Image (cartoon, rainbow, N blue to C red):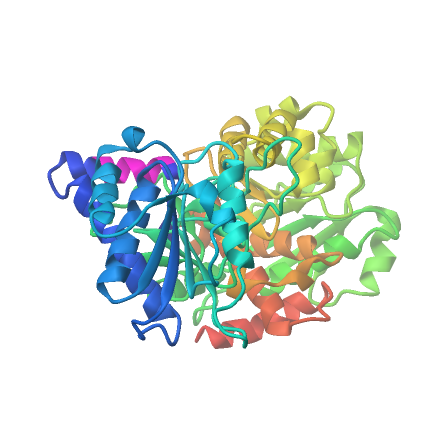
C-alpha cells in the first residue's frame, strides 16, 4: 500500500528538505518544471518533434513558477511557446519570481486576460500551471476563461490536429484534499475542466483518488525528496506487489493445513421472515473469503426460510438480546456481524449494545452495518460510548450523516465556494469520536481508525467498477470484513487493514465479473481472484 499526501503534508515535506539543506526551493522548482516536460513527452506519443507549439498558463504562486520552467525547457527543446500570466509580478514568491525573470529574458509574457482575444491556432500542448495543490478558493474568472479560450482555438491545419491538456500537480480549482472543484457562488462554468494528463510531484495527493480528474491515473514525477513514511499517513490500497500479496493471503487464512476453527467462526445476526437476503449474502461472503465456519442467527419465524436456502452456513435461533448474549458465551465465535436486514429499532439497538459489551471484554472483532447503525440515529452517543477498538463500522454516505451530521456537513461544504474538511479528514474525525474503525463506502472508499491512520481504496481510473452500484453489494463487503477478521492470524492485524483488504477484494471480484453483475455473483468470483493472485 503506497503513501498518498494531503497538500499540507506535501508542503511540510518540501519545507523539511529545504531546512535540512538537502535542496533549495529554486532547485525543487527547476526539477518540477523539467519533470513535467519529461513525463509529458514520455507519456504522449509523437511529441519528440521539436517543431511543435505549447501554451503555458501561469498563476501567482509556485505553481506558476513551475510553469515558467516548463516554458523555458520546451523552448530550449525547440518548441514555440506562448505564456500567459495572472497576478502581480511584485507579489510572486521569490523562487517563482526568479523563474519568471529567467523566462522573460528569452520570451514574452502576456496578461491572462489577453488569452481570450489573442488570435492563434490551438497548440499541441496546453499546460495549466495557474493554481496548484494549495488553492482554497475558486479560480479567478480570467483564468477560467483563458483556459476555455485556448481549448476552443481552431486547429493549426484543416484536419484535426493533436491537442493535449496537462495539469501541473492538479487542475486549477481542484482541492487536492477533498477531490472537489471549487466553484464560485452564482457562477455557472463547466466546473471540471477537461484534462488529458495530470503530473504531480513526489507522491499522489489524496484528492487524486477521491475524484477521477483525467482518463488515466496521475503521473508521479520524482523531484528528489526523501521518502520518509509515517504510520499516521494515508495509504492507498493496492496489494499487487509480492509482499502485499503474501499479506493478503495470510489475512485470508488460506494457507495449507490448520483446523476450521483456526480460520475462525463468524456469527451473523439476521432479520425476520422475508428479510434474510442481506444477511445470507454476508454469510456466504464470509465463508468464501476464508472463514472456517459461519453461523447465521435469526428469529424463530425466519428459520425455515433460511434453512431452505443455506447448506454450508449453519443456523441458530435468536429471539432477542438475551438469547444473543447466551450464544456469545461460545468462545469459539471469533467475529460477529450485525446490520444487514436486521431492522431499525429498539431491539436492534439492544442486540448491538449486547454484542459490544461482550466483545469489549473478550477482544473479539465486530462489524456493524446498515440497520445496526441507523438504529442509533437518534442517540449516536450510545453507540460511541459502547464501541471499542475491535469494531469496524461500514456506513454509506446517508448512514454516516445520521451518525456524524456535523462532519458530513463540513465534508459537503467542500463542494461549495470554499474548502471544507475533506472526506478523509471527516472519516478520521469520526473514527476518533467513535473509538473504532470507520469504513465510508463509495467509489472512493475511505477508512480510518482512532490512531490517526487512514486508508483509501479508489474504484477509479483503471479500477473503475460502476456495476458495483447494485442491491446487496454492501452486504457482501461486510461479510468479507467479518470473514477476514475471524481467523487466528487476523488477531495480529489491525481492523483497518482487514477492512482495507476486504474493500480491495470486493472491487477486484466485481472487475473480474464485469458488467451485468448482481450481488450474488461477487462471492463466487473470489476463487478466481485468489488464483490470479497466485494463492
- Closer to us: 340 or 486: 340
> With 105 as the anchor, is 142 left or right in this view?
right
* Identity of the residue drawn at 62% across and 63% down: 465
Q: In this picture, which residue range is highlighted in magenta?
A: 8-15
* Image quadrant in which the N terminus is located: bottom left
Q: Which quadrant of the rendered structure holds the C terminus?
A: bottom left
Q: Name the main secondary structure of what is drawn in magenta.
A: helix
Q: Residue at x 55, y 66 (%)?
A: 508
> Residue at the left extreme?
21
Q: From this viewpoint, is residue 92 visible? A: yes
How far across and down, in percent of the image, does residue 262 sit? Answer: 49, 59
Q: Where does the image place residue 340, in percent across and percent down from the top left? A: 73, 48
Q: Is residue 218 magenta?
A: no
Q: Nearer the viewer, residue 442 or 268?
A: 442
| Above-or-below relation of 520 to 368 | below
Residue occupying the point 46% across, 39% down: 177
Does residue 450 appear to the left or right of 355 in the view shown? left
Q: Nearer the viewer, residue 484 or 359?
A: 484
Q: Position of residue 375 (x, y in %)?
A: 74, 32
Q: Could you say where residue 495 lies in the image, as x and y percent from the top left?
A: 48, 45
- Left or right of 280 in this view: 368: left
The reply to whether residue 291 is in sight is no
Name the one closer to the observer, 287 or 238.
238
Where is 254 relative to 492, above or below?
A: below
Q: Residue at x 46, y 45 (%)?
A: 114
The number of discs equals 0
Amino acid at each position: 500500500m503506497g503513501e498518498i499526501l494531503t497538500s499540507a503534508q506535501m508542503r511540510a515535506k518540501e519545507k523539511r528538505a529545504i531546512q535540512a539543506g538537502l535542496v533549495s526551493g529554486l532547485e525543487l522548482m527547476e526539477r518540477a518544471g523539467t519533470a513535467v516536460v519529461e513525463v509529458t513527452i514520455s507519456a504522449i506519443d509523437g511529441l519528440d518533434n521539436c517543431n511543435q507549439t505549447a501554451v503555458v498558463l501561469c498563476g501567482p504562486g509556485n505553481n506558476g513558477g513551475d510553469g515558467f520552467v516548463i516554458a523555458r525547457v520546451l523552448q530550449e527543446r525547440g518548441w514555440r511557446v506562448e505564456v500567459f500570466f495572472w497576478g502581480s509580478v511584485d507579489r510572486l514568491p521569490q523562487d517563482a519570481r526568479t523563474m519568471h525573470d529567467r523566462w522573460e529574458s528569452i520570451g514574452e509574457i502576456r496578461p491572462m486576460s489577453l488569452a481570450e482575444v489573442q488570435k492563434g491556432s490551438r497548440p499541441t500542448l496546453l499546460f495549466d500551471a495557474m493554481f496548484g495543490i494549495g488553492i482554497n478558493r475558486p479560480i479567478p474568472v480570467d483564468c477560467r476563461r483563458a483556459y476555455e479560450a485556448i481549448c476552443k482555438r481552431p486547429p493549426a491545419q484543416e484536419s484535426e490536429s493533436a491537442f493535449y491538456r496537462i495539469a501541473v500537480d492538479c487542475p486549477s480549482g481542484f482541492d487536492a484534499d477533498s477531490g472537489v472543484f471549487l466553484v464560485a457562488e452564482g457562477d455557472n462554468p463547466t466546473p471540471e475542466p477537461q484534462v488529458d494528463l495530470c503530473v504531480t510531484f513526489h507522491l499522489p495527493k489524496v484528492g487524486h483518488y477521491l475524484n477521477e480528474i483525467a482518463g488515466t491515473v496521475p503521473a508521479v514525477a520524482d523531484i528528489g525528496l526523501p521518502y520518509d513514511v509515517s504510520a499516521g499517513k494515508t495509504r492507498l490500497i493496492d496489494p499487487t506487489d509480492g509482499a502485499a500479496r503474501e499479506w493478503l493471503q495470510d489475512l485470508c487464512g488460506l494457507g495449507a493445513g490448520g483446523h476450521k476453527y483456526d480460520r475462525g467462526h463468524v456469527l451473523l445476526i439476521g432479520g425476520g421472515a422475508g428479510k434474510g437476503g442481506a444477511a445470507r449474502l454476508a454469510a456466504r461472503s464470509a465463508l468464501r473469503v476464508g472463514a472456517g465456519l459461519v453461523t447465521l442467527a435469526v428469529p424463530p419465524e425466519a428459520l425455515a426460510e433460511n434453512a431452505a436456502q443455506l447448506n454450508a452456513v449453519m443456523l441458530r435461533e435468536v429471539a432477542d438480546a438475551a438469547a444473543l448474549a447466551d450464544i456469545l458465551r461460545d468462545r469459539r465465535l471469533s467475529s460477529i456481524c450485525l446490520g444487514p436486514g436486521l431492522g431499525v429499532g429498539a431491539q436492534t439497538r439492544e442486540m448491538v449494545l449486547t454484542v459490544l459489551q461482550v466483545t469489549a471484554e473478550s477482544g473479539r472483532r465486530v462489524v456493524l452495518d446498515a440497520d445496526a447503525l441507523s438504529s442509533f440515529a437518534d442517540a449516536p452517543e450510545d453507540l460511541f460510548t459502547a464501541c471499542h477498538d475491535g469494531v469496524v463500522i461500514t456506513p454509506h454516505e446517508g448512514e454516516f450523516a445520521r451518525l456524524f451530521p456535523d462532519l458530513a456537513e463540513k465534508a459537503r461544504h467542500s463542494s461549495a465556494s470554499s474548502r471544507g474538511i475533506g472526506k478523509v479528514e471527516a472519516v478520521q474525525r469520526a473514527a476518533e469520536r467513535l473509538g473504532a474503525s470507520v469504513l465510508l463506502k463509495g467509489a472512493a472508499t475511505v477508512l480510518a481508525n482512532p490512531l490517526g491512520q487512514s486508508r483509501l481504496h479508489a474504484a477509479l481510473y483503471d479500477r473503475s467498477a460502476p456495476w458495483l452500484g447494485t442491491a446487496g453489494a454492501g452486504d457482501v463487503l461486510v461479510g468479507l470484513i467479518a470473514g477476514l477478521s475471524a481467523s487466528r492470524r487476523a488477531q495480529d492485524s489491525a481492523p483497518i487493514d482487514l477492512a482495507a483488504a476486504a474493500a480491495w477484494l470486493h472491487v477486484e471480484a466485481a472487475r473480474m465479473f464485469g458488467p451485468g453483475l448482481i450481488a450474488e455473483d461477487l462471492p463466487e468470483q473470489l476463487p478466481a481472484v485468489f488464483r490470479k493472485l497466485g494463492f
